[in-house]
Image (cartoon, grey):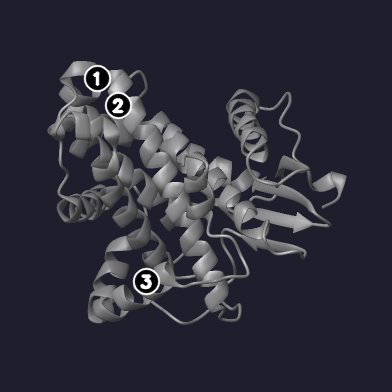
Amino acid sequence: MNNSEIYDFRDTPFEELISQYYEFCKEDLDTQSRHVNISPNVFIFNNYLTSNAVAKRLDNAYSITINLGLLKRCNDNFLQNEKLDEYLDFHYGDILGSLDNKISRLGYQIATSFTYYHELAHLFQFEKKNENLELFENSSTSSQYSLIKHYLEINADSFATIVLTSHISQYLEKSYGDILNQEIIENIFKILGACLLNHIVNFYDDISSIYLREHSHPHPYLRILNSIINLSHYLNQSEIFYEKNIIIDSNKLTNDIIEFYEELESKNIFESNFRIAMTNASDQLQEIIEYLGQLVEYNLSDYNNALEVWNRQFT
């Protein structure tokens, strides 16, 4: 990347928004670098208007680059989405009143943080393999099929989702304190899960045509299904909820997130064609589940498993 492609957010309308994001990501990247050998590293923005990001290892240096277009799309989908807050305030106002931010801002934070943690996971994966590597979060659907890249993407999504679920759980405990209960947890995660679903959907112009063993990246439906399942199942590993004797029905929450997103889509609060993809996916659901299981369990010794790298930090 040459200097003309780098986006300098200073003295721009996005300065405050991007500077907060940059500080959060760079601070965490520096922290992770003390535990995992991903130094030297750099975190930068470029001026491309497509919704994308890339993790790279080049000559034993690491980088995460975020497209300006990704941040703009997140801004449009969440921060500027008045219909989202109006709908949620009307239907869930009694629950959301204890939060210190509107869901639109939390949705923006979920989306942009997911991208950062997804790219961080790729750096963890790359650390083991001694060669130059790069992976974009979204790639052309004309690209060649790669089982390895499908695995790396699903593994990075799993990592990002579990880290976010942990952060949200801590945020809910802080926000609600002693009144935190199962109803609050299920509704908040249903809403924020739908925001995450929207973020993944919006990397693609059209997700209606389902594929499995094609292209370099897995179909967004697989990415969504994997992320929502990870979110739902990880909640029952939370010490916060365990201490309150709260047990989440993971399958029900997964379905609730998907149905709630379809509801938001039907009211044009989120604009996408996810319902069409759901209909098309239903014809090959068993194949989808089996292939997703294969990707989750795939043993790729040449790269680190990002989840195992993360877990080693806490054991």
Task: Please report the residue visible at 24 percent of the width from the left and 19 percent of the height from the top.
Answer: 176
Disc 1 crowd, CA 10 A, few/some/many (<14, 14-19, 20+): some
Please tell me which of labels 2 and 3 falls first in the chain.
2
Q: Is residue 154 left or right of residue 238?
A: right
Q: Which residue is mark 3?
A: 292
CA neighbours of label 3 inside 10 A, class few (<14), some (14 to 19), many (20+): many
Q: Depth check: 81 or 100 in front?
A: 100
What is the CA distance from the residue labelled 1 to the residue labelled 3?
35 Å
Q: Secondary structure at mark 1?
A: helix
**Residue marked by disc 1:** 176
Q: Are marks 2 and 1 in contact (CB under 8 Å)?
A: yes
Answer with left or right where residue 228 lies relative to residue 206: left
Q: Quadrant of residue 258?
A: bottom left
Q: Against 295, is 108 above or below?
A: above
Query: 108 left or right of 15?
Result: left
Indicate the position of residue 139 as horizontal and vertical percent values. Answer: 59, 66
Q: Where is residue 295? Give x, y as percent.
A: 43, 71
The kind of residue on which mark 3 rests is: Leu
Q: Quadrant of residue 56?
A: bottom right
Which residue is pictured at 46% across the width and 51% down the height? 159
Residue toward you, 98 or 226: 226
Is residue 92 at least partly visible in the picture?
Answer: yes
Query: What residue is shown with label 2?
Result: 172
Q: Is residue 193 left or right of residue 304?
A: left
Rendering coords of residue 13 (x, y %): 64, 27
Q: Type of residue at label 2?
A: Leu
**How far apart in space, not on screen, are marks 2 and 3 (Cα)?**
30 Å
Circle 2 SS class: helix
* Label 1 vs 3, first from the N-terminus: 1
Q: Vertically, is 305 above or below 114?
A: below
